[in-house]
Image: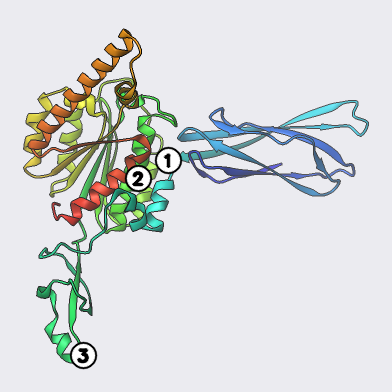
Amino acid sequence: MERMLESEMERYQKETVSISIQNLTSDNYMVRLKDGIPETFQTIFPSSQPVASEHKTMITYDVFPQRRGKFLIDSLYLRFKSKLGLWERQITYNLPTEVKVIPNLSEAKRYLASAQNYLLHEGIKIRKMRSGGVGEFSKVRSYVVGDDPRKINWRQSAKLQEMMTNEYEPEHGKYVTILIDCGRMMGVELKEGNRLEKTIEAAITLATAALHNGDHIAVIAFSKEIKAVVPAGRGLEHLDIILQTIYAIQVDAQESNYALALQHAQSIQHKRSMMLLFSDVQTFVNEDHHLFYLKKLRKKHLFVMMGIEDQLLHQKIKMKPSNAILAMEKSVAQKQYLHQKQVMKKWEKHGLPMLEAPADRLAVTTVSHYIETLNRGML
């Protein structure tokens, strides 16, 4: 018996496991097997598979990983019947195999396939350069109506007897620091997974976009203590380092220590960077003592916070109350929502923007804000 499968699987992506059976006898058999797949993998094992005499037979089945982390697939159980079907024998094979289940990379792959199409429904366009801005020289091309006259390359225009203009693109080598909250509130369950799952997928998509753009990415995962740190690096090969470092982090049943995380981020990032914190906005805005510390941080770094909208809160706001209890619930939800918006506006006046998005749009909203920041030359 031999088991063949990928050493890395993506969460919620179908993968095929192949079992090779070498029948050394001169008899044909009908076999059924059960593999030592963890309970967090959805699968249906094959049954009543024919195995020919003195031949190698390949049996396959599909698995759907539901949870990130490192898993050990060990025992493989095989049962085969006698020719007359009067008895059945079971054999256990020890085939230890380690499998890593990494976060789902669908959003990151969509961005790499076409960055502009990925951002179209957000209304964001990737611009080469702001008018009058400073950027890196890209190429010389023919002048078209609407180009900035200040970028006309008169030397090339004279040589070619045609109006030519210089094209620039935003400067590469910017620094982006991603902070991932793994505290208690990130364990809130959603339709698919929890907040931390969607946050990690959005963070990886942002890292893909920034690394593809030539920027440096650093990642810090934290709860009460620092859980994982990836120093700043560039190039798409750095994405694999990020994945191998954070793929197994889980939610802690503790409150998050934001001050420790931000201090650590500043200690490893001395250059001006965009610090993007993924956390629960409601928890963060209710702790006013962070404002004084972040105002100091804002003097050197560009701080942004991203969170997932509370769907239950929005459902309560949109519902039509049919009795006094539902009316009270809607009133309390509206009051909580208005208070949160007021606090978020106060923080934004201090240059500390906070954004919320539905769980399925968190990644594209985050990348859109990053691209818009580059387009406006804020970083």
Res 231 visible = no
Between label 3 and label 2, give the one nearer the viewer: 3
User: Could you say which quadrant of the image residue 16 lies in?
Assistant: top right
- Could you tell me how far apart the alpha carbons at marks 3 and 1 are, in whole angstroms? 52 Å
Residue 184 versus residue 166: which sits nearer the camera? Answer: 166
Res 316 visible = yes
Residue on which the image places disc 1: 103
Residue on which the image places disc 2: 204
Question: Is the residue 153 above or below the residue 178 in the image?
Answer: below
* Sequence-first tag of 3 and 2: 3
User: Could you say which quadrant of the image residue 333 lies in?
Assistant: top left
Do labels 2 and 1 touch, CB within 8 Å?
yes
Residue 71 versus residue 44: which sits nearer the camera? Answer: 44
Disc 3, SS: helix
**Image location (x, y in percent) of residue 80:** 81, 33
**Image location (x, y in percent) of residue 113:** 41, 57
| Residue in the picture at 35% in, 13% down | 322
Q: Amino acid at mark 3?
A: Leu
Residue 15 versus residue 234: which sits nearer the camera? Answer: 15
Do labels 3 and 1 touch, CB within 8 Å?
no
Between label 3 and label 1, give the one nearer the viewer: 3
Quadrant (top left, top right, bottom left, bottom right) of the N terminus: top right
**Image location (x, y in percent) of residue 317:** 29, 23
